[in-house]
Amino acid sequence: MDGQWRVNVPDLPAPPVAPVELPNGSYPTRLDDRGRLRLPAAFVRYFERLAERELFVTSTDNVTVQIYPIAVWREKRLKLATDTQDDDAADVLLVAHHNGAHAQMDAQGRILVHEELRRKLQLENRPLRLVPWVWRVDVMTHEHYENRMAAAQQDLAAKVARVTRRGLL
């Protein structure tokens, strides 16, 4: 008798999942007194939506901090480790591992930059900038950001023309 109340419902497709995308624009931030990077709300939302919450925080150039979602870092690590063209990839990977540590965003939207890295890059008690790329977030001192912006703006009209010809804009 209870079988008459069962209804056969066909499998419905899963609702579409919006892609997880980094925010656009650059943002000012700072480290707190414990070395945690304070994230703007747009970045908090991005990191909360990742399938894996683990991050890899490193520097490959000893100038900027790179924050990689762990899935992205696995892919980059594999590419660096298997590149046989020259020793550059192996050297960059060695530096990334030396400078790197795993981290997670905490409930207040902060990511710990481990002590050795923040001291090496002199990040403490300084204004910082967050700059998103396609698959990672870079953190740099305000001074480095300003220098990089000045260099980027040199001969900007010609740069825009070249990237436009290549179909990038």
Image (cartoon, rainbow, N blue to C red):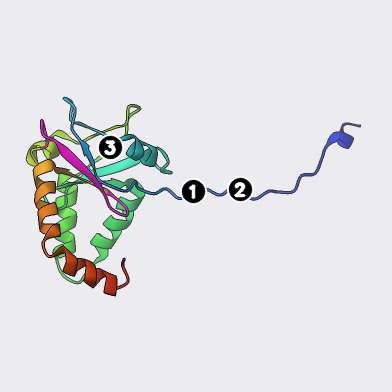
Residue extending farthest bottom: 165
The C terminus: image quadrant = bottom left
Helix, strand or loop status at disc 1: loop
- Where residue 33 sits in the image (x, y, percent)? 16, 25
Residue topped by disc 1: 18
Query: Which is closer to the viewer, label 3 or label 2?
Result: 2
First-in-chain label (3 vs 2): 2
Residue topped by disc 2: 14
| Residue under the image location 82 percent in, 40 percent down | 7
Residue topped by disc 3: 103
The vertical placement of 6 against 158, above or below, is: above
- The residues bearing labels 3 and 1 have C-alpha atoms spaced at a distance of 25 Å
| Residue under the image location 28 percent in, 47 percent down | 25
Q: Main secondary structure of the magenta part?
A: loop
Residue extending farthest right: 1
Give the side of residue 16 with respect to residue 80, left or right.
right
Helix, strand or loop status at disc 3: strand
Give the side of residue 33 with respect to residue 76, left or right.
left
Span highlighted in magenta in the image: 123-136
The N terminus: image quadrant = top right
Judge the density around disc 2: few (<14), some (14-19), many (≥20) Cα neighbours within 10 Å: few
| Residue under the image location 15 percent in, 70 percent down | 86
Circle on res. 32: none
- Where residue 46 sits in the image (x, y, percent)? 38, 42
Residue extending farthest top: 33
